[in-house]
Image: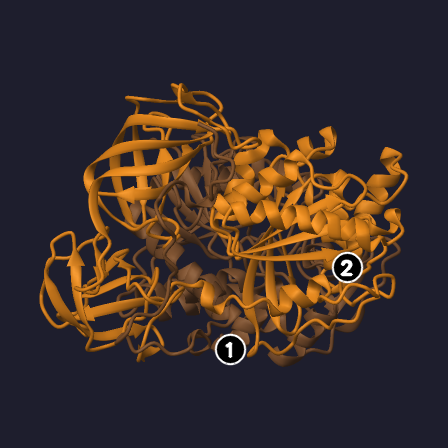
Amino acid sequence: MATTVVPTETRAMDLLRFATAGSVDDGKSTLIGRLLYDTKSLFTDQLEAVEAVSAARGDEYTNLALLTDGLRAEREQGITIDVAYRYFATPRRKFIIADTPGHIQYTRNMVTGASTADLALILVDARKGLVEQSRRHAFLCSLLRVPHLVLCVNKMDLVDWSQEVFERIADEFTAFAAKLEAPDLTVVPISALHGDNIVTRSENTPWYEGPSLLHHLEHVHIASDRNLVDVRFPVQYVIRPQSTTVTDYRGYAGQVASGVLKPGDEVMVLPSGFTSRIAAIETADGPVEQAFPPMSVTVRLTDEIDISRGDLICRPTNAPAVAQDIEAMICWMDETKPLRVGGKYAIKHTTRSARAVIRTLRYRLDVNSLHRDESATELGLNEIGRVRLRTTVPLLADEYRRNRTTGGFIVIDESTNRTVGAGMIVEAD
Amino acid sequence: MGSHGERIGQLGAGAPEPVRPRRGDGMTSPAAYRVSHLDALEAESVFVFREVVAELERPVLLFSGGKDSIVMLRLAEKAFAPARIPFPVMHVDTGQNFPEVLDYRDRRVTELGLHLVVASVPEALESGLVQEPADGVRNRIQTPVLLEAVEKYRFDALFGGARRDEEKARAKERVFSFRDDFGQWDPKNQRPELWSLYNGRHHPGESIRIFPLSNWTELDVWHYIAREKIALPSIYYAHQREVVERDGMLYAVNEFISPRAGEKPFVEQVRYRTVGDASCTAAVRSAADTVELVIEEVAATRITERGATRGDDRVSEAAMEDRKREGYF
């Protein structure tokens, strides 16, 4: 079955992160097992261990879910509790899978997995078609602005490879995705169990003219998903060597959030508003001519300006909002206490920390019906709503839909220090 | 109230405005801004190092002289250049080491001008903090020794070289992994980790384990060693060694491992895929004596590195999870 080879050469490889959502019933674990197996990323001892445990439990088939359900509690209860990360590579790409459980009580896990994903894979059972869960997954992917969506219509063998069944599901999903402003959508008819349309195109679907799933994952164009327009460089750390050999060095270290920085560029530093020019962009391997996402670099400026962690370097003509009043969608992740109007929290936004008070809860969104409940007074675990909040210090913020890095923030409970919410900025003023 | 027919992905934020080049920005095609997977992994790890040093009080890097901790140290060097690495390194020394690895550790620490903290298992055995296990494998008793050193030096952030591809319990580990004031990991109660917004907040006595190599695979590590021309302890490359075969694995005959009844030592061409305690780390048959040959071998292998070489992981299905709960790396 395997037609791919494990790479020994890496020059041409890039990185694609994708999230999968679904339950064992949809064949998600089988699909992941199949991708790992066919790209030779599944090892004999892992497979033998899973076979042995499956046999001991009396499973009728080798339960590939056991590959990812690594925690004792997950094995005991036969459920996926947490996001599991899996890795495989082909000569073209390295892939990171964030495998998330699909049920509604794990919405926070799916939001977590989707936050860094370039692509999301949603599975449906061809016999059942779209279900409430499929729509919820698509909605969460659009909320988190995952740029590419793939709907895998699985178990096509059980509907006799019917083109009609496939097209009905594809049409229905496409119509729904259009409402979500879902970016790029691909629909693939597959059988994860038998390997159809996974690595190579299947003879069972002569009517299907699209790529196999792996071919799509290898070729989907992700280079332009990055925002290369708006220069945003959150200062992470100031490098000032205490050394006799390197003197008077002051460099601003960070990871480029968006845009392209070049030596000589005129820049503005926020929140102060001072302007200067980029003197050099440095890395441990020497200076570079330009920096773009996701490079981690050190920027030096021509002028001595007081800059510290949490400040942001941008262009004078293209700056984010400097704002303390923030409109945001929030996914609540704390099982112990709900988000309440008037509640005070710590937030972390880029490299900047602040305190915030929830001023207004505009509505709570039903993630299945997308109905907005404007009478809601709090957000419980896994609930999503739109809030207005005020921060103690200004955030240097863009809309999340334009910039996933300068538009996202986390909410932290100040007494327990736990991460209790994920925020996506809708408007900052 | 209802939102049907509305483009809900907009979150009510007004008309969509596609991100597109603006005139005069000198934009070239996005393909010109290619980032290889190794560059992306490196950038992510460097970000993690800087984040920890910016936000936590007393970080330390766990340095064993194994390839993952060696790569981690290189990334730390890159994160703060031209300044020195702004934290010490710590070796939890079981007293059962491969001499090549100890030599490497000391040489590297001197080169980088680092402060080395040694948390010594032999000293802990002497003081009675831990007892020698019946089977002589000191893996598990490293944990109290590590935790004692963390308390003594008040370290609140420990960089470890663990990778998620190594083991299924590690597949669920966070990059910033919270430990309570007993150093324990609670896998069911982990902090959600979104975007690159890491939460390192903790109360006094608690700590965070940091795993900058979370998203690296064994093959990525080797590709990086090749690309960066990183020197490794010689035992990672093929060499002749006297070994015995035990539980299907090849153990070097040395001061820590003597042939048992029925075991016949023989000389074999081997290399080490992982380097840990010399009493429980096995070698694999290999002719790979260069980094390129090792990459070919790793790419072709069908057995995980821990499965092939670690006696300590063969105890039970959840051996790693159990050790991690107690505060293991």
Mark 2 secondary-structure assignment: helix
The amino acid at mark 1 is Arg
Chain B, colour shown: brown
Residue designated by label 1 = B227
Residue B316 visible in image: no
Chain A, colour shown: orange
User: Do marks 1 and 2 share a subunit?
Assistant: no
Horizontal side of B302 relative to A347 (left or right) equals right
Horizontal side of A209 relative to A406 (left or right) equals right
Residue B266 visible in image: yes
Mark nearest the camera among 1 and 2 is 2
The chain carrying label 1 is B
Vertical arrangement, residue A145 with respect to residue A412, above or below: below
Mark 1 secondary-structure assignment: helix
Q: Which mark is residue B121?
A: none
Horizontal side of A142 relative to A59 (left or right) equals left
Q: Quote the CA–CA distance across marks 1 and 2.
A: 28 Å
Q: Nearer the viewer, residue A51 or B130?
A: A51
> Residue at point 33% right, 72% down?
A291
Q: Position of residue A297 (x, y in %)?
A: 32, 67
Tell me, yes or no, whether the two marked residues, 1 and 2, touch with CB atoms within 8 Å: no
Q: Position of residue A75 (x, y in %)?
A: 73, 34
Q: Nearer the viewer, residue B110 or A302?
A: A302
Q: Nearer the viewer, residue B247 or B36?
A: B36
Number of marks in picture: 2
Q: Position of residue B232 (x, y in %)?
A: 53, 72
Residue designated by label 2 = A37
> Residue at point 85% right, 53% down?
A162
The amino acid at mark 2 is Tyr
Q: Residue furthest front?
A: B5
